[in-house]
Image (cartoon, grey):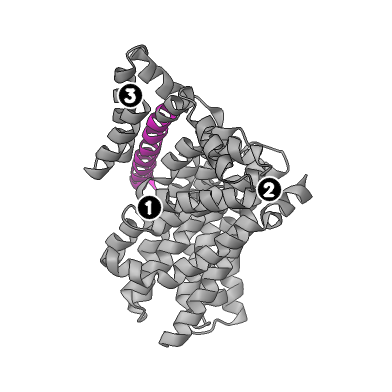
């Protein structure tokens, strides 16, 4: 059964079948080969995979991100970041990193952050004399912060899959996200200085203050969302509902950027993105269930512990595995399939599931900008009209920066867990 499951999945991936359909077809073939499992189980297990209250946060955060994109919130964040950092060498590229960090604290999606901000910032950077590869690379790699800095859809999926506290995961993701952001800013600064990219004109104190005042409604949004979760006022799912309501009110009544015409576009975009993710979750849940009933997690645990019972060796193996998986598999599907297999082993070796979750998410986030299946690369390639192979070459310095950050986050757990313990 497992042989059919794995081989059929590999073949389907090789011939280019979409991830969700590949997972569903391989699972169906495995059940047919088993012969003793009713086909009705396919529908039942797919439904059970989606029957979770925390997962309701996903369509709501996606809708909140779409409202931000159309409602002028993104532009205000860009204006503020530009006013503060635009005059530094590589200023507009630094603005891209900083704005994406702000946007990540609201949207929870890497692709959403890349698409929404890239449509504005990539053409702006190119017009200011930045290379296409550099402009696209900065936006693509900055977009990975969308699934690291809370609220994060992959963190919700991980917490749901393994029973970890989503609130603790959100708290734990803050410092690693900031560390990666700082690493990217330093990389941008060094490259911009070396290549002599133009600086933006330095803004006066009055202009900075004006940009700050205009951005206040946008800046309050993550404070409400994250503050409400951490203080226990509402859950992550309820916070997503609050995010939608707040984004709608600000976009319609404060910035007045949304009208009857684009409401349909917003709902259509959010619905399409949600249905894609939910389809992947349903089929990935079925795939994961088959692995579980065949005792694959226990066999993997035995295999890894037979190599070494050192937590550090285990983390190294996991990071290398996830870097490889991230190149070929969509992040959400990877989490749903691999987290139930790897987390029991991590706990058995004494690792905290929250810290392990952050390591997983950060490692898989790198897969968003590595070919052949780096989704951020496809988005940026389309916006910037630049070939993916050229983008990848331009990303090498950023790969180094992110990998250094990953090593620090992986092997120094206190960086991730100190804030969680302090907040308790």
| Residue 244 forms part of the magenta stretch | no
Q: Horizontal and vertical percent for residue 50?
A: 46, 27
Instruction: Please identify the dominant SS of the magenta region.
Output: helix
User: Which is closer to the viewer, label 2 or label 1?
Assistant: 1
Mark seen at residue 227: 2
Element carrying mark 1: helix
Q: As drawn, which residue projects farthest toward the left?
A: 15
Q: Which residue is tagged 3?
A: 30
Q: Are marks 1 and 3 in contact (CB under 8 Å)?
A: no
**Mark 2 against mark 3, which lies toward the viewer?**
3
Return the residue nearer the eye: 246 or 12.
Answer: 12
Reading the chain from its start, which is encountered first: label 2 or label 3? 3
State the residue at coordinates (45%, 73%): 93
Q: Secondary structure under badge 2?
A: helix
Figure quadrant of residue 155: top right
Q: Residue 277 lies in magenta, yes or no?
A: yes
Q: Is residue 71 visible?
A: no
Task: Give the spatial CA distance, label 2 vs label 1.
Answer: 34 Å
Specify the quadrant that holds the N terminus: top left
Region of the chain picked out in magenta, as a range: 259-286
Q: Which residue is mark 1?
A: 327
Q: Residues within 10 Å of mark 3 (few under 14, many from 20)?
A: many
* Label 1 or label 3, whichever comes before in sequence order: 3
| Residue ID at (41%, 26%) | 286
Residue 63: x and y in percent read 45, 42
Q: Nearer the viewer, mark 1 or mark 3?
A: 3
Q: Position of residue 110 (x, y in %)?
A: 45, 53
């Amino acid at each position: 059964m497992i042989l059919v499951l794995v081989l059929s999945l590999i073949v389907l991936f090789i011939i280019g079948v979409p991830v969700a359909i590949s997972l569903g077809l391989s699972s169906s073939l495995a059940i047919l080969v088993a012969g003793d499992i009713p086909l009705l189980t396919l529908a039942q297990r797919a439904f059970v995979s989606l029957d979770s209250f925390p997962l309701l946060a996903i369509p709501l955060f996606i809708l909140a991100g779409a409202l931000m994109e159309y409602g002028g919130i993104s532009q205000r964040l860009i204006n503020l970041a530009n006013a503060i950092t635009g005059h530094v060498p590589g200023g507009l590229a630094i603005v891209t990193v900083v704005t994406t960090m702000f946007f990540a604290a609201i949207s929870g999606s890497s692709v959403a952050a890349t698409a929404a901000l890239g449509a504005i910032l990539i053409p702006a950077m190119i017009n200011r004399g930045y290379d296409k590869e550099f402009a696209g690379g900065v936006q693509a790699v900055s977009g990975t912060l969308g699934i690291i800095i809370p609220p994060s859809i992959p963190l919700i999926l991980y917490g749901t899959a393994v029973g970890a506290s989503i609130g603790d995961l959100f708290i734990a993701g803050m410092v690693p996200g900031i560390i990666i952001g700082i690493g990217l800013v330093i990389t941008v600064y060094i490259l911009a200085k070396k290549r002599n990219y133009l600086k933006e004109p330095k803004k006066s104190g009055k202009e900075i203050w004006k940009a700050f005042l205009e951005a206040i409604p946008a800046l309050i949004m993550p404070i409400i969302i994250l503050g409400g979760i951490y203080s226990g006022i509402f859950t992550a799912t309820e916070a997503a509902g609050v995010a939608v309501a707040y984004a709608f009110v600000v976009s319609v009544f404060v910035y007045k950027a949304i009208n009857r015409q684009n409401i349909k576009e917003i709902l259509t975009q959010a619905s399409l993105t949600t249905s894609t993710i939910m389809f992947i979750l349903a089929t990935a849940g079925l795939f994961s269930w088959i692995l579980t009933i065949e005792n694959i997690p226990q066999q993997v645990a035995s295999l890894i512990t037979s190599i070494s019972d050192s937590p550090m060796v285990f983390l190294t193996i996991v990071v290398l595995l996830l870097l490889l998986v991230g190149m070929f598999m969509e992040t959400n599907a990877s989490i749903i399939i691999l987290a139930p297999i790897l987390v029991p082993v991590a706990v058995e070796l004494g690792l905290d599931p929250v810290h392990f979750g952050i390591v997983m998410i950060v490692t898989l986030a790198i897969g968003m900008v590595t070919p052949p299946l780096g989704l951020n690369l496809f988005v940026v390639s389309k916006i910037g009209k630049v070939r993916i192979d050229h983008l990848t070459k331009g990303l090498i310095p950023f790969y180094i920066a992110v990998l250094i950050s990953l090593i620090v986050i992986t092997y120094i757990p206190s960086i991730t867990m100190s804030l969680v313990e302090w907040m308790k």
